[in-house]
Amino acid sequence: MLASSNALIYEGAINALSYLEDVALDELIAALDVEPPEDAVSEEQRREIGQKSILATRVQRALLGMPHFPGERLLEVAGVGSDAQVKQVIEVFLAKGTEAAQVVVANLFHPDERIQRCVRSIAGEMSGQVIVPALLEALDHPEPGWRAMVAKFLLRYPREAIPPLVSLLDDFERGSSAEKILLAFGPEILPYLVPGLDALNNMAQERSQRIVVTLVQQIPAACA
C-alpha cells in the first residue's frame, strides 16, 4: 500500500505503520535499502529505483511519525546495514530533530566504531538549535572524554551555546564545565556575561568574574 499511486491509500498506510511501531520496524528498515539512480544501467532500472526512492521517502515518514522514535534500533542499521540504508537513516535523524539529538548525544561513544562514526557525522550535520540542548544535558558526564567531546561540539555553535552556558554558571553540577567552555570561546562571550556579573547567586558571579579576568589577561591590548 505504501507504493500505491493513490494518495489516500499511501497516506493511510504511512499512518498505520507509524502506530504499529516495533511490529513494522524491521520491514520498514529493509525498505530503506535503495541504491542511487546513477548506479542503474538501463532506463527500466532507473525507473524501478525511482519507484523505490518514492517508497523510501514514505518509509521515512512512517518512521518519523512513530509515537516513540526508534532511534536506538535505527542506529543498529549503521553497524550492519548497506550504505544506502545508512544514508536513509541519517536523513531520518536529521529530520526528527530534538528527540533524535538526544539519541545521538547518548551514543557519541558507541562501542561499535562504524556506528560511532555515523553518530558523530549526524551530530556534525545537526543545527545548533537542535543539538545544543542535548549536549548541555551531558555537560556533567563523569567521563572526561565525554565532556571533552561535548565541548568540542558546543564550540561549533557560539550563537546557540553561549547564552545557555552563561545561565548554567550557577548550576552546581554543570557550572564548572560551562565555565571552561565559555573560556574556550574567547572574548566574544564578554557581552553575554553581564547577567552573570550582576547575578545574586554568588557562584554565578564568581565564575563570571573569573572568566572576565582570565580573558583580559589573555588580551594585553585590552588593558592598555
Image: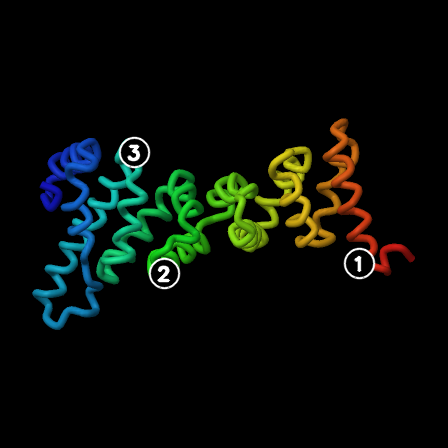
Q: Of label 1 and label 3, which has the lower sequence position? A: 3
Q: Which tag is nearer the camera, tag 1 or tag 2?
A: 2
Q: Which mark is drawn over residue 218? A: 1
Q: Callout 2 environment at 10 Å: few (<14), some (14 to 19), or many (20+)?
A: few
**What colouring method underlies this structural image?**
rainbow
**Residue 83 in the image: above or below residue 190:** below
Position of 128 relative to 15 (above/below): below
Q: Is residue 169 left or right of residue 75?
A: right
Q: Residue type at mark 2?
A: Glu
Q: Residue at x 16, y 51 (%)?
A: 30
Residue at the farthest right position: 224
User: In the rendered structure, which disc, 3 or 2, sits on the residue that comes first in sequence?
Assistant: 3
Observer-nearest residue: 19 or 14?
19
Name which residue type carries label 1.
Gln
Numbered mark located on residue 113 in the image: 2
Residue 147 screen position, x and y as percent: 55, 49
| Mark 3 secondary-structure assignment | loop
Q: Are marks 1 and 2 in contact (CB under 8 Å)?
A: no
Give the CA separation, mark 1 to mark 2.
39 Å
Q: Which mark is residue 68?
A: 3
Q: CA distance from mark 1 to mark 3?
A: 48 Å
Q: Amino acid at mark 3?
A: His
Q: Position of residue 184 (x, y in %)?
A: 67, 54
Residue found 9% across the figure and 43% down from its top: 4
Q: Few, some or many C-alpha atoms within 10 Å of disc 1 (few <14, some 14-19, many ≥20)?
A: few
* Element under disc 2: helix
